[in-house]
Image (spheres, grey):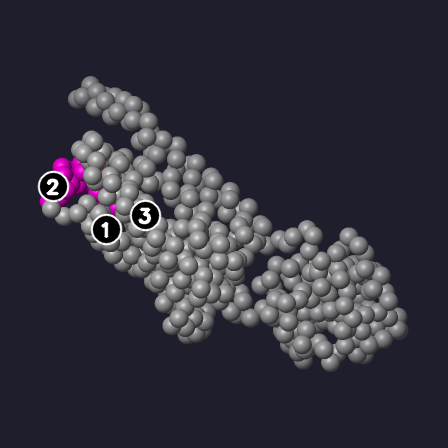
Amino acid sequence: MRNNILTIMKKECLRIISDRKLLFSAVLLPGLLIFMMYTLMGTFMTNMMTTDEDHIYQIHVVNLPNSARELLSMPELSLELINTTMAEAQTIRQQITDRETDLLVIFPENFDETVAAFDPATALAPAPNIEIWSNGARSESAEARHIVTGVLNAYHHALTHRFSINAPSADAPDGLFDLATDADIFAMVMGFLVPMMFMIFIFTSTQAIAPESISGEKERGTLGAVLVTPANRRDIALGKILSIAIFALLGAVGSIIGMILSMPSMMGMDTGSFIEFYNVSDLIMLFLVAASTTLVFVSVLSVLSAYAKSVKEATAYSTPLMLVVTLTGLASTILGGVPSEPFFYLIPVFNSSLSLSAIVSFEASAINMAITAGTNIIFTLICTVILAHIFSSEKIVFS
């Protein structure tokens, strides 16, 4: 019995070792993919939370005292100080909310004189308070707040706490002074998570069906029977792609619905607040992008499956594509935001990731969404022609 087990083990080990594709995909590839994926995700997350080194922060200041002017004007801080009146403060705060400028700092009138006369031990009134308004959902604004707060905190300790920074006030009773809305925070999180997860869900659903439908039939010998029928090879190719796409899209939609339903809990929001962020046009664009992306994945995997000799080989061919899909899911993070130039939406798969980011970040353009869907459909038709050509080759089909 022991010898039989050892014989079988030896046979199976030799089979796996001799199959280089299987050895690579089963032993080496998973660790390599995880290492590369998480390394790149960490890099992109870091880049997303940092700003360009050449960025000059726009700091609107009300009642700027001479003492603070000297501290904040140091060239290495890269701060552009813009004198602002109290009457303009509300407009500046709206601009910060709209991501048009970086920071608003409000000093009390006669700040230097008031601080000099203030004694924490005997004072009956609160210390002079500096308000620093920012948008935490925008990296430039958050970094500007960090720089200014750091400088003023050092000054604050040097003056033995004769003034306060962002103490609760009538305009900010919680003391946060953060102008980021729920939609801003929601868009920042969704813009990173959704495209990558969306692309992975669609690809894995396609990967589960396409190899079996084509290379599986080829392996069983039933594909040849289909090809000897009077049907045009192009019609057979398109029929297979469309039928696979339907079920792949259904599988992807199920996964996406589960992800969407879990988002309110993950982000600490109620379902009503979550739903109100998007309208019918957003959902229509989301479906068009998902459907056209599914067609691209199905057509590519169908071509690979037609070349493969078995389902196992087809799966091995498609596994490395998962890394490509994951990376394209981070397209907007790589580019530092969602681009508006139509050129980016002419690249299949890459355009889908950008379109998804644009939709969930409330930056979708109907023109760019149409370019994405059109490009993906054209790419699918090209793959259909290639698949029909493969079906016409007896050498490939019956290999």
Q: Nearer the viewer, residue 109 or 394?
A: 394
Which quarter of the rendering shows the C terminus?
top left
Measure the C-alpha gap from mark 1 to mark 2. Answer: 16 Å
Q: Nearer the viewer, residue 151 or 219?
A: 219
Residue that carries the numbered disc 1 in the rendered image: 238
The three-letter code of the residue at mark 1 reads: Leu
Give percent across and percent down for residue 321.
38, 42
x 11%, y 41%: residue: 228
Whether residue 121 is visible: no
Measure the C-alpha gap from mark 2 to mark 3. Answer: 23 Å
Apparent side of residue 341 relative to residue 20 in the rendered image (left or right):
right
Apparent side of residue 282 relative to residue 241 in the rendered image (left or right):
right
Label 2 Cα neighbours within 10 Å, binned few <14 / some 14-19 / many ≥20 = few
Give percent across and percent down for residue 336.
56, 54
Q: Nearer the viewer, residue 155 or 56?
A: 56
Residue that carries the numbered disc 3 in the rendered image: 382
Residue most toward the top?
3
Q: Quadrant of residue 281?
A: bottom left
x 35%, y 50%: residue: 379
The magenta span reads: 209-229
Residue that carries the numbered disc 2 in the rendered image: 228
Please determine whether, in this image, residue 282 is positioned above or below residue 353: below
The three-letter code of the residue at mark 3 reads: Ile
Measure the C-alpha gap from mark 3 to mark 1. Answer: 11 Å
Mark 3 or mark 1, which has the lower sequence index? 1
